[in-house]
Amino acid sequence: MATLRIPRKYQSLIVLFQFFLLIQIQLVLCYQYKVGDLNAWNIPSSANKDVYLKWSKNHIFKLGDSILFLYPPSEDSVIQVTKQNYNSCNLKNPILYMNNGNSLFNITRPGEFYFTSGAEGHCEKLQKLHISIGGGNGTSYDEADSPAFAPSPSYTNVFGSIPVQSSNSTSASSSGKVEISVFAAVGLLFLTLFIGSTIL
């Protein structure tokens, strides 16, 4: 059996290439976050009234990620609003209205995004969410920009019917990102060891 012979002067180049490949794999992963890491988008309990505020501050969202709101469609909804309407809990003139109980918001541009429950009185009880997506250049964003909502595939619904899933889905769940990253790292390590053993 023939072995691959790579001159020593190129070995470090191969390792560097593998390192950059690993970085690229990590950069293209998109994550799907379940809002609040809860089973349902609802009014926070009195013991944990800042659940959505704390949750959004503990996550770094990026372009391509998505946030999933789960709720009983007969009892609640999600609306995207302006900063002013978010602060005043004004539910009139939402930018986006979602009410299927399985609402997926795709992040397609940098900026500030404000969400609240579409049910009367829920926003005042802190059922609202603010997320910030940086552009990488310190730019501030205008609230009048178009919403970052894009049609998206639907996922398993714990409340009600399950919409048809799109065949061009690219989102990954939070647990999926770990599995892919570990798989890629182990694969690159194996490739490095394999190439290293055939060179020597």
Image (cartoon, rainbow, N blue to C red):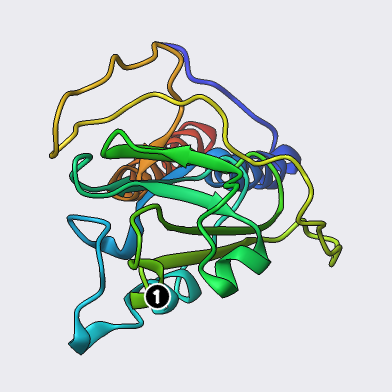
The answer to whether 117 is drawn above or below residue 172 in the figure is below
The residue beneath circle 1 is 124
Q: How many discs appear?
A: 1
| Residue 5 or residue 123, whichever sits in front | 123
Residue drawn at 46 percent across, 26 percent down: 152
Position of 127 compared to 37: left or right?
right
| Residue 20 or residue 178, whichever sits in front | 178
Asked which secondary structure carries label 1, the reply is: helix
| Residue 162 or residue 15, whichever sits in front | 162
> Hey, which quadrant is residue 82 in on the image?
bottom right
Residue drawn at 13 percent across, 39 percent down: 158
Q: Give percent across and percent down for residue 133.
A: 65, 58
Residue type beneath disc 1: Glu
Is any atom of residue 38 visible in this view? Answer: yes
Position of 120 compared to 39: left or right?
right
The answer to whether 200 is drawn above or below residue 43 in the figure is above
Quadrant the N terminus occupies: top left
> Hey, which quadrant is residue 187 in on the image?
top left
Q: Give percent across and percent down for residue 71.
A: 22, 48
Q: Give percent across and percent down for residue 171.
A: 43, 33
Is any atom of residue 25 visible in this view? Answer: no
Q: Give percent across and percent down for residue 193.
A: 43, 42
